[in-house]
Image (tube, rainbow, N blue to C red):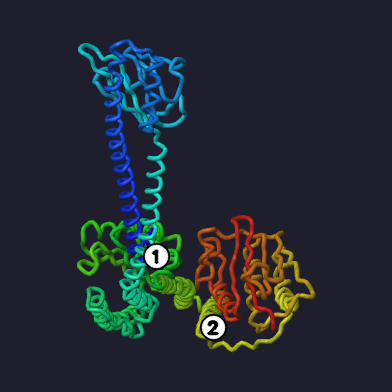
Amino acid sequence: MFRSIRSRITITFVILIIITMLGLGIFISQHSRREYLQHQQSELAIAARMISDAILPGLQGNADPQSLDAQAKYYASLLDMRVTIIASSGEVLGDSEGNAAQMENHNDRPEIVQALAQGQGNSTRFSDTLGVSMLYLAMAVPSNEEPLGVVRVALPLQKLESDIYRMQQTILLATLIAAALATFLAAFIAERTAHPLKELTKAVEEIATGKFKTGFVASSLIASTHDEIGKLAQVFNQMAAHLNTQINALESERVKTTAVLQEMSDGVFIIDAEGKICLLNLAAERIFAISSDTALGVSFAEVVRYHQLIELWQHCKDTGEAQSAAVEIPDKPLYLLVIAAPLGKVAPGNILLLIQNLTRLRQTERTRRDFISNISHELRTPLASLKALTETLQEGAMNDPTAAHRFLQRMEKEVDALSLMVSELLELSRIESGQVPLNYKATSPHDLIAQAVERLRLQAERAGLTINIDCPIGLPNIQADASRLEQVLVNLIHNAIKFTPAGGGISVKAQPGENEHKLGTVQFSVQDTGIGIPANELPRIFERFYKTDRSRSGGGTGLGLAIARHMVEAHGGKIWAESQEGQGSTFYFCIPMAQ
């Protein structure tokens, strides 16, 4: 209701004065009315007593009613009031304003009843005879035993009401004048009081808008008075200067802390006592694929949704001691080292979570182990074969020309396999290190597919397979090294021939990339009707030396798909596979179109 000190002072003063004047007016009106009525009642009592003494002989001698009616009219004209003479039975014997004979019995009138019982009665009520409000006073005419009758005198209240109305108008006018003066005075006082507060508010608003951070001090807030507000202004200036220094120092520290926090490779969460996230850095956003805009102020359990992390935080909160654990999240996949530590006195109830993402390190370690295991396995077979053939020759097979020639041919085959493996390893190493030069030029997808299929068509026919090409003639050219991409297609088609039973088919296609991630590319695919790849092995088929259980007996080095993946990625493309066991496989890769 009161939004400013000025309005608060002004309205309060005005309301107080109006209420006071109105209360005073009502009191004076009621008091004046009461005093007036008492004065009139006194006058009426004197008149009634005088008339009572005058008509007493007539009532004692059973005077004629006409004589009493004449007396009532006489005294009424003399005293300028209504006079009524009433018998003790209530019968009207005379009345100055009406025909007494036609008037009803008055024994039920309150002033008559009171007069007969107590000697005198009065009332203020509406007169049915005259049609106006009247002030009545009745006095019993005394006798030795019971009253002989009652004399009632009355005055109309019109004059009283008129006087009271004029007095109320005077009080109302005085109230309005006083309220206007009070409003002006209150507004003047409020303005003088609120002006320095306005200046103070303006200074605070400027600080809130950021000027405080640029060294703003409320220099414009000069204390013009020596009262409490003036002292407040002086203290505020001192506080502003001190806070400015403090905030500049804190801002500098905050910038440094934020820079360090955001550049950290480890994820950081700060969780308050209610389990809500107070702070997180960019590394935490990347690890859990979340945004600080939606995560801040939200429950940690709702944002992360991994029970291992939630249990670690809860345990740290319950015990008040630092906790650490290695957490593996298979569905991401993620391998994390999580450290939870209470912030203690710095921020009571808050928990710091430091999350180190060891996923890449673990993948590298697993790849290294797999590489050593795979290359050991691949080398062991030909070396063991060479060892056996050599020992057989040394034990006497050299003396048998036919056997010796056959063993030498097998040794040559094993050496060729080893040479191929070493050659492919060197090629893969050169591709991964970026040492393979690529001769980019606009290349027709149709020509690329046709050349790769032509190289392997005879081999497919010998295996009892058919190869189909599905490639529109008007397909846009791609920016590629034709010989390298042809080798990728050859590797994929060769694998399809190797793992497709006789009577099956292979389809080689090219078409424009369809979804938003492949726009501006040409998508190649090699589809077969072979044995397929198990779903649990599909994510690893592009790793070096990786072979599915069904392909281990089929020879090969296990490097063809790894070379194909690196070569496609060197062209800025992407390669992937889809398969169902027993229903064949489809290998896809997409290459950017030529500009």
Mark yes or no: residue 447 visible.
Answer: yes
Instruction: Say what amino acid the circle numbered 2 marks.
Output: Ile
Q: In which quarter of the view is residue 479 placed?
A: bottom right
Label number found at residue 245 = none
Residue 558 % position (x, y): 53, 71
**In front: 60, or 163?**
60
**In front: 202, or 451?**
202
Label number found at residue 296 = 1
Is 566 on the left or on the right of 312, as rendered? Answer: right
**In front: 465, or 385?**
465
**Residue at figure coordinates x 32%, y 10% from the top left:** 62
* Mark 1 secondary-structure assignment: loop
**Residue at figure coordinates x 44%, y 70% from the top left:** 286
Extreme-right residue of the structure: 473
Give the residue at mark 2: 431
**Residue at figure coordinates x 38%, y 52% from the top left:** 170
Find the distance from the CA under tag 1 to the CA under tag 2: 44 Å
> Which mark is in front, 1 or 2?
1
- The crowd level at tag 1 (other Cα within 10 Å; few <14, some 14-19, many 20+) is some
The quadrant the C terminus occupies is: bottom right
Is 342 on the left or on the right of 550, as rendered? Answer: left
* Mark 2 secondary-structure assignment: helix
Mark earlier in primary sequence (1, 2): 1
**Residue at figure coordinates x 20%, y 67% from the top left:** 345
Q: In which quarter of the view is residue 510 placed?
A: bottom right
The quadrant the N terminus occupies is: bottom left
- The crowd level at tag 2 (other Cα within 10 Å; few <14, some 14-19, many 20+) is some
Residue 406 % position (x, y): 57, 75
